[in-house]
Image (cartoon, rainbow, N blue to C red):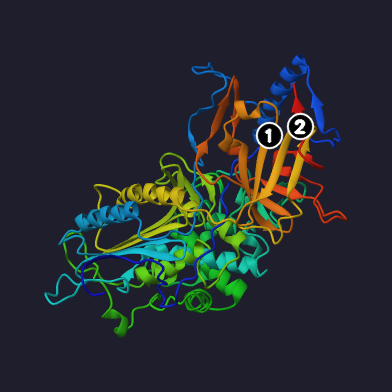
């Protein structure tokens, strides 16, 4: 642990408990066409020449409807009309699956990240750095560079348990408190106005539609003016806006600095003659005041407990974040990386007082990896429900170009990177810099902690992801999908039709997984076999998910028709309740607005 450098760790839980692999969800698969079906009893179909032409045209159109519900614009053909023409490859975003290590391309990417961060070090302005890469419930890689204390010739290298000040990463914790109190029913809505919990809260809003000087009282988001005659809805300071830099509150309280040691009621009193810098919900504006006020109000007015005590009991202890705290004890001091200014001089560890929720905390790469796994829904110690995690990781608002992020979230800065949303929180406070970041769609995270000033020449987080994301994508695309068979495939096996126009056979593979194949007059000539055959992954009772086992063209061109295969990827088939013979009489594909795909007695024969 003590040696400088990096190491690749696979399937290792950061708190000493073996990580539990998350079962891979079945990925999407090619599907066939449908769209509205009626029963048919005819097993032998005779086609006139005109009828055959009509069938082929209609079959293609219905395939397009089943897959996308509309036909894409036609393009001129450069090939024979019977050949399928592929363009962009899908799925655009591969589904996270269990990976079998080692993976050479991923190893190469992590070596590039190692070199990048190693070259970021500066013996004067950035002498110590620790980083960790998380994938789902696994620590993929750790990197530790430099010396914990540049002033001490005998100082050792940092490791994943070295303590750094995390500055504004502290804002993640009031946000977690907000979501937890909301889940527990102690907060009615994330969009509750602050006035609901602070009766005497007022602040001037000259940019809003109402003047706070006219404000009398607020109930359920409705403002009542002094006249008592007019009732209008407020664009108020809400809890969610406070947690997403949209409250319009100033960066700090008037006549205070970050070392202010006042009380929450004093802060509320000071705000009565202050002014919002933006109409709430209309502009991204960074505010330490918003997070500190939110944290103290939730603790004192809702949870009736000290904020730090609540965070320790309900988050840090629960997630096993043993080295994360608001204060540094003499024992923890020996684990710290010493922060320095850009000139190399040691930075003091001053106390932020009332603003502690916005930037006081200390942590380690190992502890923040646990937090990342929890937010990705992969950690074996649960804090929030899956739906709450989804909401917390969603962007809330698109920011103006003058803000340092494209969008804001709770409490994230959100930017797009290689087609993915990257949520991150940066922190910079005297002597220390830190970044906590996630790419939720890939179940990927990167934490970088620094003693010193972050590089101004390039964003090493974005650069690191530019190596990691393509490697992870490649690994997921090449990984074997593990599909689930139904408890008994027999009720689903057989032949089906949609309006006696298109036909399907469902059979069970050797592993019991259902395989569906489209067939019919000249279908074999018009549509390549690999796009006529799909697999169905069993989810719950009589419900299956369409799975493409391999990459496929997002748009398939057949003759003059253009069909989106991407739209059917991952769609659900809901089979009907079994009849007296123990067979399902048909199924629906509701996501494709397709109903009554019905079972037929045997395979039909076709004659010209």
Looking at this view, is 209 or 379 the one in front?
379
The CA span between labels 1 and 2 is 11 Å
Q: Residue at x 21, y 61 (%)?
A: 126
Residue 27 visible somewhere in the drawing: yes
- State which tag comes first along the sequence, 1 or 2: 1
Q: Position of residue 92 (x, y in %)?
A: 49, 41
Which residue is the site of mark 2?
605
Looking at this view, is 511 or 307 the one in front?
511
Residue 414 visible somewhere in the drawing: no
Q: Residue at x 74, y 34 (%)?
A: 35
Looking at this view, is 222 or 337 the one in front?
337
Looking at this view, is 81 or 133 the one in front?
81
Label 1: how many residues lie within 10 Å, few (<14), some (14-19) or many (20+)?
many
Rendered position, 549 above or below 19: above
Answer with left or right where residue 328 lies relative to residue 55.
left
Q: SS class of the residue under badge 1?
A: strand
Rendered position, 573 above or below 69: below
Answer with left or right where residue 528 lies relative to residue 579.
left
Question: Residue 195 has which mark?
Answer: none
Rendered position, 55 above or below 298: above
Question: Residue 519 has which mark?
Answer: 1
Q: Where is residue 561 in the image (x, y as percent from the top left)?
A: 61, 23
Q: SS class of the residue under badge 2?
A: strand
Identify the image quadrant of residue 348.
bottom left
Q: Residue furthest left?
A: 153
Q: Residue furthest bottom?
A: 331
Label 2: how many residues lie within 10 Å, few (<14), some (14-19) or many (20+)?
few
């Amino acid at each position: 642990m003590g040696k400088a450098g990096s190491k690749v760790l696979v399937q290792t839980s950061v708190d000493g408990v073996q990580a539990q692999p998350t079962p891979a969800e079945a990925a999407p698969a090619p599907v066939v066409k449908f769209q509205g079906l009626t029963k048919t009893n005819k097993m032998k179909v005779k086609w006139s020449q005109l009828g055959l032409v009509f069938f082929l045209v209609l079959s293609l159109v219905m395939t397009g409807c089943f897959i996308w519900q509309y036909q894409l614009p036609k393009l001129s053909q450069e090939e024979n009309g019977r050949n399928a023409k592929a363009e962009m490859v899908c799925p655009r975003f591969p589904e996270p699956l269990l990976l079998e290590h080692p993976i050479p391309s991923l190893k190469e990417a992590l070596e590039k990240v190692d070199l990048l961060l190693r070259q970021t070090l500066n013996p004067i302005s950035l002498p110590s750095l620790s980083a960790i890469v998380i994938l789902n419930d696994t620590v993929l890689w750790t990197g530790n560079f430099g010396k914990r204390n540049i002033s001490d010739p005998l100082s050792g290298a940092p490791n994943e348990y070295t303590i750094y000040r995390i500055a504004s990463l502290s804002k993640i914790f009031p946000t977690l408190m907000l979501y937890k109190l909301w889940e527990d029913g102690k907060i009615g809505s994330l969009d509750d106005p602050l006035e609901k919990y602070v009766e005497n809260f007022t602040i001037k809003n000259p940019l809003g539609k109402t003047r706070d000087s006219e404000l009398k009282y607020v109930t359920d988001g409705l403002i009542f003016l002094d006249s008592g005659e007019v009732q209008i809805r407020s664009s108020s300071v809400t809890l969610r806006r406070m947690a997403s830099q949209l409250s319009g509150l100033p960066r700090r309280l008037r006549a205070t600095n970050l070392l202010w040691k006042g009380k929450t009621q004093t802060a509320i009193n000071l705000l009565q003659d202050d002014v919002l810098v933006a109409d709430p919900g209309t502009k991204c504006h960074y505010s330490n005041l918003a997070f500190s006020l939110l944290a103290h109000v939730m603790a004192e007015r809702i949870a009736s407990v000290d904020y730090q005590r609540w965070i320790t009991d309900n988050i840090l202890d629960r997630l096993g974040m043993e080295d994360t705290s608001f204060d540094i004890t003499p024992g923890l001091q020996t684990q710290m990386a010493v922060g320095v200014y850009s000139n190399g001089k040691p930075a003091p560890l001053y106390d932020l007082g009332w603003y502690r929720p916005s930037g006081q905390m200390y942590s380690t790469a190992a502890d923040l990896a646990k937090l990342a796994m929890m937010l990705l829904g992969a950690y074996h110690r649960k804090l929030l429900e899956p739906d709450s995690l989804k909401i917390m990781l969603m962007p809330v608002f698109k920011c103006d170009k003058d803000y340092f992020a494209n969008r804001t979230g709770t409490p994230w800065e959100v930017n797009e990177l290689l087609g993915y949303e990257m949520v991150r929180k940066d922190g910079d406070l005297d002597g220390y810099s830190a970044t906590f970041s996630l790419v939720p769609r890939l179940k990927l995270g990167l934490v970088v902690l620094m003693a010193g000033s972050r590089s101004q020449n390039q964003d090493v987080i974005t650069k690191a992801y530019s190596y990691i994301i393509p490697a992870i994508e490649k690994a997921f695309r090449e990984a074997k999908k593990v599909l689930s068979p139904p408890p008994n495939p027999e009720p689903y096996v057989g032949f089906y039709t949609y309006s006696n126009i298109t036909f399907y056979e469902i059979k069970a593979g050797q592993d019991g997984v259902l395989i569906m194949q489209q067939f019919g007059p000249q279908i074999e000539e018009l549509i390549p076999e690999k796009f006529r055959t799909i697999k169905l992954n069993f989810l719950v009772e009589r419900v299956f998910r369409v799975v493409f086992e391999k990459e496929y063209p997002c748009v398939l061109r057949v003759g003059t028709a253009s069909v989106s295969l991407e739209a059917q990827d991952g769609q659900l088939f809901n089979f009907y309740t079994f009849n007296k013979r123990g067979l399902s009489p048909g199924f629906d594909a509701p996501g494709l607005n397709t109903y009554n795909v019905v079972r037929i007695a045997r395979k039909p024969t076709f004659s010209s």
